Amino acid sequence: MNKLSPKALFAACIGAMALGLTTHSIAQDDSKAGMPAVSKSFLWNNGPITFVDTTKFKKAPPYAIGFSNASVSNLWALGYLHSLELAAEKNKGMIKKLIVTDANDNPTKQVADIQDLMQRGVDILIVRPATEAVDAAVNRAAKQGIPVILGDRRTPSDNYVSYLTVDDWAQGRNMAQWLAEKLKGKGNVVLLAGMAGASPAEARIKAANEVFKQYPGIKVLDTQYTDWSPAKGKTVMAAMIQKYGKDINGVWADHGLQASGGIEAFTAAGYKPGEIPPFTCADLNACWINAIKNKVPMMSLDNPPAGGGVALETALKVLQGQSVPHNLFIPTTITVTKGDETPSIKADMPAEDYARLDKPGDLILSTGIPNYDPKTFKADFPK
């Protein structure tokens, strides 16, 4: 396999987005491992892509764009916002104003935010829903003829123009499949989930259990929500360690935010390098750093917050009357610590090559922003 830098690999992913392609490397068989690989179509079951005719929304620029954000309560969400703002800067000649609201993860506030954006006369809404409870507000916007782009999370109704995210089912399945195969089909696992009620978290949990149920020798000891927080991930994991101890053979975490805290909980409990059970991870540099430093077998499947920029670009296409996918799963990157690939899960590149050991742990690697630093990032766009 030719090695690409994280930047080059991400650029390849972005180039594939328009075609709905993926860049995953998954083997179909590996006789040396002693276990057959599962079907690729099962792990990456995206379904067909339906394109939406947006000619009825076509109008001349510049445009007023509203972004109703669930929150910036974690580093991933901040990266999503920054990616969207950078895309606005690159396209500021077409934008009259970009209005950003923050619901602080409160769906009631987000409903009010969406209503306020509608009253301010935005041409299009980009919504990253706090929970499915904002569905009624999205429906009201659609009924008033305002096109809606959903990013990261979706609402139950189908009244949006385009929904852009990673395939949460595929993410949950692949993480669980790797863990099950790493444990050779036998062992006890715990699940560190994201935020209760958020569609990515709920879908990934269901997908993971879908896989674990196929292995009679795998037992799920516990499932706890962490709000995608490193601190809460550490607290929840510490409680699990106290309760189950050495009975924990593997940890399924749907993101690196809580996974990084989970690894810290093991080290705080006295586990030495090489003693911590396998973990799954995503996006956060600290997760790779902690795993490599403590010799933790790890598989990561990114959920690129660069989707924020893709959402802004898609909104501009809608207002220009260009066809857009109704649902688009953004390509992602699989990394695995060296020597820990399994029959079904192969790395796009080794975790040791993908991680930025020279950078802070709070870096989100998949924003698509060159030399990204969340502390110093600034974008120039019309407000």
Image (cartoon, rainbow, N blue to C red):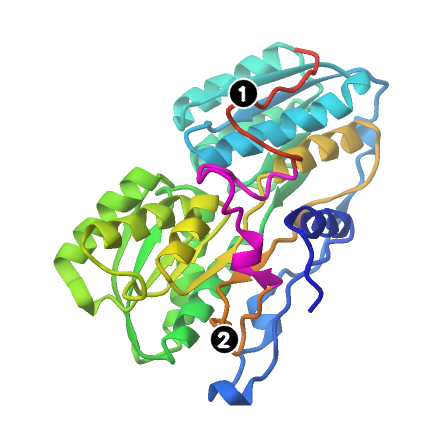
Dot 2 or dot 1, earlier in sequence: 1
- The disc at residue 253 is none
Asked if residue 312 is positioned above or below residue 272 in the image, the reply reads above
Question: Residue 265: percent from the left, percent from the top?
Answer: 25, 50
Asked if residue 317 is positioned above or below residue 32 in the image, the reply reads above
Residue wearing tag 1: 114
> Which corner quadrant holds the C terminus?
top right
Residue wearing tag 2: 342
Q: In this picture, which residue range is highlighted in magenta?
A: 348-368
Task: Give the residue drawn at x 44%, y 40%.
Answer: 361
Which is the main secondary structure of the residues drawn in magenta? Answer: loop
Taking the view exactly as shown, the residue that stands out farthest to the front is 358
Q: Nearer the viewer, mark 2 or mark 1?
A: 2
- Is 61 situated left or right of 142 in this image? right
Determine the secondary structure under disc 2: loop
Question: Residue 212: percent from the left, percent from the top?
Answer: 37, 71
> Which corner quadrant holds the N terminus?
bottom right
Task: Give the residue drawn at x 24%, y 66%.
Answer: 248
Circle count: 2
Name the amino acid, label 1.
Ile
Question: Residue 336: percent from the left, percent from the top?
Answer: 51, 63
The one nearer the camera, 191 or 60, is 191
Residue 291 seen in this snapshot: yes
Task: Give the residue drawn at x 68%, y 61%.
Answer: 3
Q: Quadrant of residue 270?
A: bottom left
Name the amino acid, label 2.
Thr
The one nearer the camera, 161 or 263, is 263
Determine the secondary structure under disc 1: helix
